[in-house]
Amino acid sequence: MKISIRVIAGIILVNLLLWGCSKNNNSLSTLNLKESLNQSSANLNKAVSAIASTKAYSVFTINDGTTKSVTTTDSVYKVYIPLSKISGVYEYKPVATFDKWGMSLIKFFNKTSDNSNMIVKLPLTKVQNPRSLRHYSAGDSALTNNFSISVSDYHNNYNSYWDYDYLLSSEVTIDGTVAGDLNIKSIISPTAGIDYASQFAFTESYTAKYKYLSGDTTVSSFTITGNDKVLYEEKRLTIKNDTARFGREHEYILTIGDVQIVRKNRADSAKVYVGGVLQPDAVVTIIDKQSDAEASVCKHRDIQITFGDGTVTTVSALIGNSIDNIATIFDSLHSVYFAAYIVDWIAYDIYYERN
């Protein structure tokens, strides 16, 4: 009998302790919203500053404003370029010759050896100014090939603007040191829709990713991670729902470290979570500076948070120094001009001139 009483008493004590821990954890998560947001913002600012200081950043974020060597909007144009047709090692060697259009590119490269990858070596200054790749300057002979990109997987299967699939896996080296990896998958099908993903892995374990997937649930997301932990993410979901207004439901999610802000529909109030725990005492106001269906923190959007103690802050106040760089990274992942101006240009010219 005494043993049974002791067992029951022990069970009650354990339950009380667990209840107390649960209560304390909920209280701590509520109290730590401000602290978590400040720390998560500091971690993001540190990461963005580190990314912007890398050698790869100036390459990955180029926007030269030029066009590709082939006009892919031509409805008649079709091509399939696999890696096997463009593989080899190509090294930049300036020559003072031009074709009749003055735009030859492959004449500036010599194939120096065979390789299962497409490896292109050229001066970093030419990469940072892609327009200069097609023109000879007297000072080019003094440049060294201190930039290299090794393409380990590639195919460009183009049937029309709404029917193509594209794949690129590559490693970038600057001054003999690996600077990052660029990977792109882009599939557009008249039946299956759009499946696009691009990412650049910088040094120090920082990675930036962009994804767009169409369908009954359309997902668009932009993410910056550090050591595989999400430091920043903006995600939009558009969900088909015949009973909803206009037949669609919208969800916006902003994640900064452990803090997540969620708005289910544009007319609804946003909620804030820390580590997945709702913070009921906090008030979140999403401020769009002008009408923009795709407003983001980098474009026409700020978010105000009023804490339980009455103090107020905004996302722009917390990460304002990083917003321009975040916007640049987003635009670069979305458009990937680097791949278009360097890898695709050279791949097209190798394919048409050497095959």
Image (tube, helix red, strand yellow):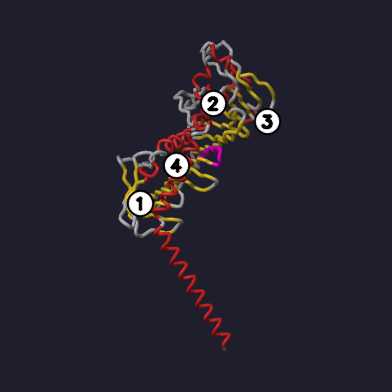
> Which label sits in the foreground, 4 or 3?
4
**Contact (Cβ within 8 Å) of mark 4 with mark 3:** no
In front: 287, or 78? 287
| Residue lying furthest right | 114
Residue occupying image coordinates x 54% and y 78%: 10
Comes first in the chain, label 2 or label 3: 3
- Residue 138: image location, x then y, percent: 54, 11
- Residue 164: image location, x then y, percent: 53, 34
The amino acid type of the residue labelled 3 equals Ser
**Contact (Cβ within 8 Å) of mark 4 with mark 1:** no
Image quarter for residue 149?
A: top right
**Quick one: quadrant of the N terminus?**
bottom right
Comes first in the chain, label 1 or label 3: 3
Comes first in the chain, label 2 or label 4: 4
Answer left or right for 322 relative to 209.
left
> Which label sits in the foreground, 2 or 1?
2
Crowdedness of circle 4 by 10 Å Cα count: few (<14), some, many (20+)? Answer: many
**Contact (Cβ within 8 Å) of mark 2 with mark 4:** no
Residue 172 visible in the picture: yes
| Magenta extent | 194-205
Q: Is 202 colored magenta in this rendering?
A: yes
The amino acid type of the residue labelled 1 equals Asn
Residue bearing mark 3: 116
The amino acid type of the residue labelled 4 equals Asn
**Quick one: quadrant of the C terminus?**
top right
On residue 45, the disc is 4
